[in-house]
Amino acid sequence: MATLVTFHAHPDDECINCGGVMRKAADEGHRVVLVVATRGELGEVDDGFLAPGEDLTTRRVAETHAAAEILGVSRVEFLGYTDSGMMGEPSNDTPGTFWTASVDEAAERLAKILVEESADVLTTYDDNGGYGHPDHIQVHRVGRRAAELAGTARVYQATANRDDVRKHMGAAAAADAEAAAAQGIEAPESFGPPEEWEIGKPLEELTARVDVRAYVAAKRAAMRAHASQISEESFFLSMPDPVFAEAFGVEWFIREGAGPGITETDIMAGL
Ligand SMILES: [Zn+2]
């Protein structure tokens, strides 16, 4: 048995990026530890979703624990920073946000967990945080430094296959726009032409391709547990199961120090 520590920026990121490898590792008898930098305080929530007096942060912590149980997580830790908001927002500079945190100081918090757990494998994010969110970029920086401090040799940057994302999410966005037009309602927010989306990394930079199709039901159920952020109408939950399996049935990583090219199909191989 080995220990996987999977490090994320906000509640729900763990399901989207690593839900498959988490459930897979747990099913194979490994210990899975989830560490989340913030409690996702700036997430948007529909009016009336929260009960009177309920605050979003408390809800998102509860959702994280529920999703973690579905994914086979043994321990959940929050590093105690706050959500920085999207790049360029004034909230980026608010004291206490993850983006304003000292990389060394935040890395010490994570390294303490890595040492306690004798972590064999750490997952972080690519150097653009997948899509440029400041807290996600900080996961990359803090994760790398924490691994150095703790002596965790095996670090995988969770990312996406850029071409795949453009294809699948582009198709989902086009379908949503078409459905909206047919119903005569306003089209969902457009993020521009899919071929220009700076999401994930090109295939030639990726080193691990993990087939998690056997775990997509758990991955989707875990997404559903984050109901304050991922609604039934979102493309994550509205697409038919086979389409979801195709879009989310592979998780991609860049192993630090490995490559070029795909050299691995399992981040826990040999452990
Ligand atoms: Zn996030």
Image: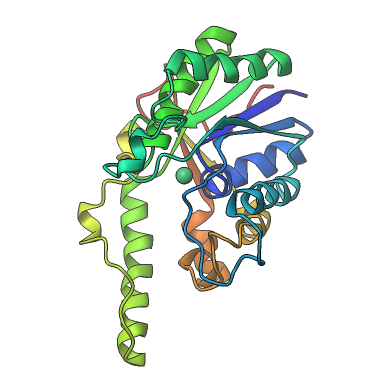
> The N terminus appears in which quarter of the rendering?
top right
Picture quadrant of residue 118:
top right
Residue 7, percent across and down? 56, 31
Between 181 and 49, which is closer to the camera in this rendering?
49
Residue 85, percent across and down? 39, 44
> The C terminus appears in which quarter of the rendering?
top right
Residue drawn at x 59%, y 18% is: 109
Instruction: Left or right? Give the position of 206 relative to 78.
Output: left
Picture quadrant of residue 184:
bottom left
Instruction: Left or right? Give the position of 181 relative to 253.
Output: left
Residue 90, percent across and down? 30, 42
Residue 247, percent across and down? 47, 58
Q: How is the image coloured?
A: rainbow
Between 112 and 83, which is closer to the camera in this rendering?
83
Residue positioned most to the front: 53
Residue drawn at x 43%, y 23% is: 101
Residue drawn at x 69%, y 44% is: 23
Residue 133 visible, this orientation: no
